[in-house]
Image: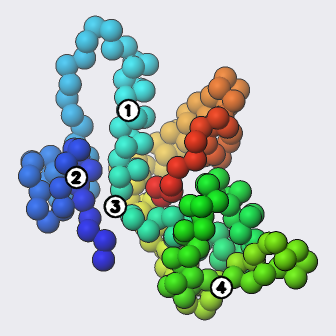
Amino acid sequence: MNQEVCVCCRRHCPMNDLHCETGREYARTGVVKEKHHRHHSSDNVNDQLAMKLRHLSRVMNHHPDKKGGQSRVLMILNRHDEMSQKRLTEHLELQPGSVSELISKLEASGYIVKEISEEDRRNVNLFLTEEGKKAAEQAKQERKQKVEEMFVCLDEQEKNQLLQLLGKLEDDWHHRYGMKHHGRRHKHSENTSLKD
């Protein structure tokens, strides 16, 4: 079982051995307490928005889910009868080596099988085993619960307002900076390992 860690500071203490009051409050409530900083006169609302987005990104990226990449692969394959390794790599937008490592781990766990394509023997097709399908369904439920917990402090109206604002920001950044939609990375950025 993965060791859950605190996301309230850079020490990332184990949740069963917390060293600060902020971490203990996070353990009780599941909410990261806002740090109160003295804002310099130059800290306008744009600076504060940028800081909030960076902080939220850090919290999400440090969420204790070390098998997030494997879970994502299982859920993607569960939506298809079969998928080539090449297509999966394009879908994940990761380096081929990173995807090969994920597939090897899932294959060793008995969750997927690989078959050489009859149409093109250079391609490998991926299939979920029965155990893999069960693991994919479990991962789907765990992800659903995680997402619900992430937004529990907002009511439906607030969620819709936030969604509209983030969509507006995404559209503007897409046109302004050439970013791809649907959470895809900037076309010039390097691919990194999965965090979710």
Kindly report which numbered mark, 2 or 4, lies closer to the viewer in this rendering: 4
Upstream in sequence: badge 4 or badge 3: 3
Residue shown at 62%/55% (left/top)?
A: 95
Q: Residue type at mark 4?
A: Val
View extreme (top): residue: 41
Res. 26 in view: no
As measured in the structure, the alpha-carbon distance from the residue carrying label 2 to the one carrying label 4 is: 36 Å
Query: Under tag 2, what secondary structure?
Result: loop
Res. 194 in view: yes
Nearest the camera: 34 or 82? Answer: 82
Residue shown at 67%/23% (left/top)?
A: 176
Upstream in sequence: badge 3 or badge 1: 1
Residue with the mark numbered 4: 113
As measured in the structure, the alpha-carbon distance from the residue carrying label 1 to the one carrying label 4 is: 42 Å
Query: Under tag 4, what secondary structure?
Result: strand
Q: Residues within 10 Å of mark 1 (few under 14, many from 20)?
A: few
Q: Residue type at mark 2?
A: His
Q: Residue type at mark 3?
A: Pro
Query: Measured along the vertical axis of the image, is residue 178 above or below residue 8?
Result: above
As measured in the structure, the alpha-carbon distance from the residue carrying label 3 to the one carrying label 2 is: 10 Å
Residue 130 horizontal/vertical position (percent): 60, 91
Kindly report which numbered mark, 4 or 3, lies closer to the viewer in this rendering: 4
**Do callouts 4 and 3 mark residues in contact (Cβ within 8 Å)?**
no
